[in-house]
Image (cartoon, grey):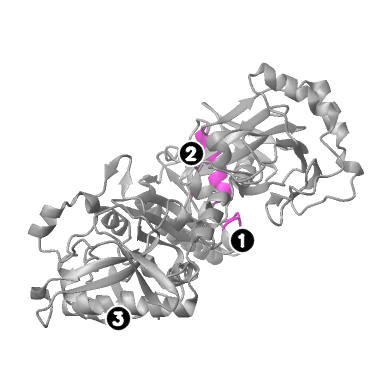
Amino acid sequence: MDNCGKATLSRKCDRKQKRCQHIIEKETGIKCTLMASKCIAICNAGLVNGLSEETVYENFIQYGSIDNITMLPGKSCCFVRYKDIEAATRAFDNINGKLNIAQNSKPIYLTYVENIPSPDPIYQNTLPTGLIIIEDFVTDTEENMLLELCNFNELENGSMKHRQVRHFGYEFRYDINNVDKDKPLKEDIPHQCDILWEKLKLEGIDFVPDQLTVNCYKPGQGIPPHIDTHSAFEDPIISLSLGSSVVMNFKNEDVNIPVILPKRSLAIMSSESRYAWLHGITPRKLDIIPTQNDLSVIHRTTRVSYTFRKVRKGECDCQYTQYCDSHAKKLKSKSNSIKNDVAMQLETAHVYDVYDVIALHFSDTRCKPWPNVMKFLYSLQPGSILVDVGCGNGKYLRCIENVFSVGCDRSFGLAEVAGQRGFEVFSCNCLNIPIRDNSADGCISIAVIHHLANEERRLQAIKEMARILKVGGKCLIYVWARDQIRNQEKTFYLKQDRKNRKESSTAVQEQSPENVTVTGDVTLPVHVNRTQFQDQDLLVPWKLRAENTPDNKENTFLRFYHVFEEGELEALCSQLDYIKIVKHYYDQGNWCCIFEKIKKD
């Protein structure tokens, strides 16, 4: 390359560097510097666009001893700290703008920084509750005996995409994530494993399994994050690591804990770690472990794991309901099986028509934004597009500056109220939102999908919200909870006594309990206002006093609700493989869920 070409390349590199430096300082608070230092930032590649810690290590270790590598979740940058400036300078000179390991094999651009970010608090060193690691659980001799017992070099069958596998007692079927409890295998757990139960007794654990899965992992192979199916196996699940050490990642919502499983160690997953934490092994050939003063690197060799379980007879009744397939099955069986054509009639008569009539008065009772909804809105970046599905009178549409907000509502009356207040609104059904795919950065749906009369329609509404979100966009959903008493504390809904209701301007009055045939052969109970819900599918009265009606006559309207059990909203969202639940919580008589749209595999 001539001098002119080199100068052009240098200017291009400088421009990209300056843009990236600005992004790094804005997103991480780390100051860039023109002076050489031990700390280097990779400006344009990180976890979010596919750069792995392993790749960083393999390319940067060539130039000197590395003190730390920091990969930031959700960021397109990462950091390397060398033990001395000379090594950092060598790496900078040889890599900057030259090493093609960024997305689409583009070059990475480096900058010196004053320091590197502190480890993210979501990466913790403490073990998940219920996880026990017993090192040197078996001797070298016992390890060799167990490796010979299941010699995968002789196996022709049982090979999977990511690893070789063999089952004893019962076959674990990966297609259904369960075992066929009525079809035990001819081969029981080998008697040579009996030594393990005696060792467990010495640890105070009385456990004799009836199912064994043996996996063989070659270097570079792993297993996707998962929770063992609740209904399939009891508590605990134990796993013996043979042949090689490995790092297993445990994840629960935003908390990620990498756990070293040394060779010959036993991992015991019980209680919360068994039922509520995803565990998996990242496919790579080496594991990088930060220590107090250095990086420890584990080069993987062939690893064989013996995972022992006890098949559950019956259904699971654990407390971790949002992860429990038995609980989800129970909820589904309870769900009202109202057919779609009947559901449409029910929603028209007892949701849409009602809200059109009571729109003005309903709007007067819905003025104050809820704090946790505001918290979600404040998390949106300036310039974001927000869609409020079921916006009502539009009270959330102008809460945040520098965000473009648009609302929609099936009720023409409420949409008209919102429009008169100057908001950008249109009328539509939440089952078919006329917005293009991948358009919105954020979406909220507050007290909407509990008005849909069957599970299929509630799921369809969630699909529509996910469809209009961009990848990485988040949605917040609120639904009314069946349980209006949480931790022995009544919700505001129950606390409003009869005297306060009479003195207030609200038009809601108590009704006598009764059943109403709403359409066809569907009969629903009428709820008594300000009391605990007795049923999931019901009618809730809204009574307009004479002064609130055009004809000066009192009238009572019955609105359809499906009130949600604990875990039901998360179970519904979990049916979609292109969204992930970021957070779920209970808020003043409502179940709430935040999900994020992710890329499909």
Q: Is 91 one of the magenta-colored residues?
A: yes
Q: Is any part of residue 442 visible from this angle? A: no
**Residue mark closest to the camera, 2 vs 3:** 3
Q: Quadrant of the N terminus?
A: bottom right
C-alpha distance separating marks 2 and 3: 44 Å
**Would you place residue 212 above or below residue 223 in this image?**
above
Q: Are marks 2 and 3 in contact (CB under 8 Å)?
A: no
Q: Quadrant of the C terminus?
A: bottom right
Which span is picked out in magenta? 78-102
Left or right, residue 234 beside residue 532: right
Q: Which mark is residue 426?
A: 3
**Would you place residue 541 above or below residue 226 in this image?**
below
Quarter of the view holding residue 5: bottom right
Looking at the rendered structure, the secondary structure element under dot 1 is helix
Left or right, residue 581 beside residue 191: left
Front in this rendered view, residue 141 or 207: 207
Left or right, residue 440 beside residue 99: left
Q: Which residue is mark 2?
A: 123
Q: Is any part of residue 118 visible from this angle? A: yes
C-alpha distance separating marks 1 and 2: 29 Å
What residue is rendered at 63% in x and 37% in y? 247
